[in-house]
Every structure is written in structure tokens, then in C-alpha cells.
Image (spheres, rainbow, N blue to C red):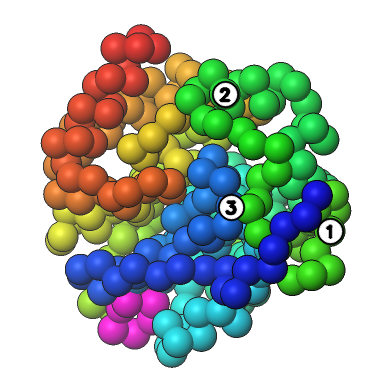
Amino acid sequence: MSLRVAERWFEYERLSDGVTRIWEPHVIRVMQCNIWHVRGRDRDLLIDTGMGIASLHDAAQHLFDKPLTAVATHSHLDHIGSLHEFHDRIVHREEADTLTRPSDNFSMLRDEHPVELIASLERAGYVIDSCFVTALPHANFNLLQFRCPPAPATRVVNEGDVIDLGDRVFEILHLPGHSPGSIGLWEAATATLFSGDAIYDGPLLDEIPGSDIPAYLRTMRRLEKLPARVVHGGHDPSFDGARLRKLARDYVDKRG
């Protein structure tokens, strides 16, 4: 397979409230994680780290000008790829063990993955092309051999724990369903939720290994009552509180 080498791997979008969205435009939609950089007074917050195909730490140095805490909303590969590049790493207790080991080998080619997995992604509404990337980070990148190094958590969190940036405080919400240790980060002062893959404005995945539909239903009923003003999800565009309530209610109506 012949793919071009990308001129740069990451793109950036500055939003309000000191938030910057970072993403990998050359990764197919289902694996294209939103990486959120949040500015604080004493330290900054990095929510998820993408695939790790290219170095996030090196590419986004212009953003990383103070101490930084990196949070994994869950331990799926598309969210933890560059986590090992950062010294201060947070994950929910339910998925901390996963980060102590290298990831399994991940091929970028569709045909190397189980038919059942591809079928579940397509049932959810995703188009899965023959290759999971549309370009290469460098000429020697091996599409068949990709692993993420271990990135052991320096702090494990549970429901109700907080991350304090000095002038901003985020509460951990345990939102299982997509995965056992999925979390959201809730800033009550601005009514902002960083939701990871618990909810986003696109096809949700609840038929993959580790997912749990009954737990997901409980999470959605909880999110339906959250007084959010804005939600920054793990994939796809951000949305407002009314859209959050509709997405949560639609899921409950479909699966409940």
C-alpha cells in the first residue's frame, strides 16, 4: 500500500475558556480522538493523547509551557498512544493495570483485524476503510507493527476525586459503559464536561470488548440530568447541554 508522508501529523483549534482541541487528521474517524489541552493558572491539563503514531509532546511544544497533567479518559489505544510521553499521568482505578503493560500489536490494516470487530464498528455506523490511516508520519512507518509503550499511572482516581489547576477544578465522574473505567471531567464553575467516549455526537460503541450496555444505560441516565453548558467529547464536534440530553435520551430509548 502506497501512502504519502504527511507534512504534519496534528491539527489545532483554539476554543473559548482556555481550551485547545488537537487531533490527528490522517487517522480514520473511528480512531480519531479529540485531544484537549486546558490552560490553568498553576498547571495545564491534557485530556487524552491520541494514537501515538507521531510524538504529541514534540509537536505541541508551543502549548506545553507549564507543568502538565495528562489524563486518560479510558485505556483504549486511540486515547493513550502518547501518554507515556508525559510524566504526570492519571487514569481511573478500573483501567490502571492496562497502562502498566505495552499495548498489543495494532495493525493499521483492516484485514488484519477480526471480522467480528470490524462488523461491530460498521453496525454502529462507521465506515472502515482498508487502512486506518490516510498518510504516514514518516517514510519508515510500519503499518503492520504498532505498539504503545507502558504508561503507568502516577495517580489513580475514582468517582468524586478532583484535579486542581489552581484556578480551575475538575471533578472526576465515573461513566462506565464504553469501558469499565471510562471517566468524564466536570468543571462545575463553567458547566463544562470533558466526556471521553462516554458520550460524543457520533456513533457510540457498546458492542466492543469491555463494553457493558446496562452500565452504559446507567451512565446515560446520569448524563441526561447533568446541567452542562458545553460538552467536549472524545470524538467529533463539541455540543451544548440540550444536545447532551437528547443524545443521552436517544441512547436510553434505543437500548433501554
* Mark linked to residue 27: 3
Counting from the top left corner in percent of width and height, residue 229 is at: 15, 49
Answer with left or right where residue 190 lies relative to residue 180.
left
Question: Which stretch is magenta?
Answer: 39-44
Q: Height in image: 36 above or below 240?
A: below
* Residue in the image at 15% along x and 61% along y: 189
Counting from the top left corner in percent of width and height, residue 33 is at: 50, 52
Quadrant of the image occupied by residue 155 = bottom right
Whether label 2 touches label 3, CB < 8 Å = no
Is any part of residue 121 visible from this angle?
yes
Dot 1 alpha-carbon crowd within 10 angstroms: few under 14, some 14 to 19, many 20 or more? few
Residue identifier under label 1 = 142
Q: Earlier in the sequence, mark 2 or mark 1?
A: 2
Residue identifier under label 2 = 122
Which amino acid type corresponds to the residue marked 1 in the rendered image? Asn
* Residue in the image at 76% along x and 42% along y: 109
Residue 42 among magenta residues: yes
